[in-house]
Amino acid sequence: MGIDVAVSFSGTGLDSSVIVSGLSSYVSGSYTSPEGIGFTIDANAHLGIGGIAVQVLPAPSEDARSFAEVGGTNITLYDNADPWTFAHEAQHNFGLDDTYLEGDGIFISTPGLMGTYGDHMINREATRLFETYCGPLDATGSFNYVSFDSTLPG
Ligand SMILES: [Zn+2]
């Protein structure tokens, strides 16, 4: 599965080229579904209009966390964002949820890009991403190519 998404930036304080390269760094790879089917994701982002719109804002506090619309096309990155943050937030745009749990002062971290920040995407996240856009992985393995160049699916 290939992903290519255009990303536009407003605001200052982050190197946009470093940010967009994070999608490939943290998402591209070879994966295995829970049923044992191998597949690959080749994810790339490039600067352009029509895909994801990133607004960069000064971090309101030291521990402020960037955020994104689930299923939407907008991401707010604070200027304290780490290189993996865009890759994480872009997955929210693609429809994935966080896997870590927090509340009442409790934080339970989980592995993967949608769990503890800073981890590479893992098999179950990649399977979810693949099946969201390409349908169920079949027994023979399917290698669909999806290009989101300029437009994200609704
Ligand atoms: Zn998140």
Image (cartoon, rainbow, N blue to C red):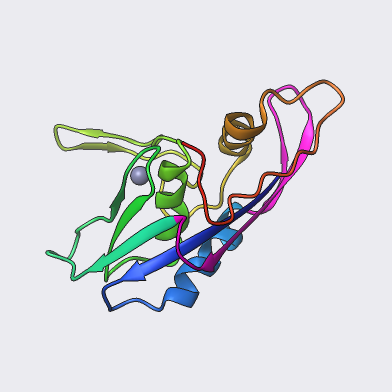
Residue segment shown in magenta: 28-51
Visible in this render: residue 14? yes
Find out whether residue 50 is within the magenta segment.
yes
Expressed as whole percent of the image width and height from the top left, the position of residue 51 reads 47, 55
Find out whether residue 48 is within the magenta segment.
yes
Residue visible at 73% across and 26% down in the picture? 137
| Relative to 5, 40 lies left or right | right
Expressed as whole percent of the image width and height from the top left, the position of residue 109 reads 37, 40
Residue 13, image quadrant: bottom left
| Relative to 131, 107 lies left or right | left
Q: Is residue 91 above or below residue 106?
A: below
Residue visible at 57% across and 30% down in the picture? 132
| Relative to 56, 28 lies left or right | right
How many callouts does the rendering have? 0
The answer to which of 33 and 144 lies nearer the viewer is 144
Residue visible at 52% across and 64% down in the picture? 22
Visible in this render: residue 115? no
Expressed as whole percent of the image width and height from the top left, the position of residue 23 reads 54, 59
The answer to which of 50 and 130 lies nearer the viewer is 50
Expressed as whole percent of the image width and height from the top left, the position of residue 80 reads 27, 69
Residue visible at 49% across and 47% down in the picture? 113
Q: Is residue 144 above or below residue 5?
A: above
Q: Is residue 149 above or below residue 13?
A: above
Residue lying furthest right? 140
Q: Is residue 29 above or below residue 97?
A: below
Quarter of the image for the N terminus: give it: top right
Report ligand 1 position as a quadrant.
top left
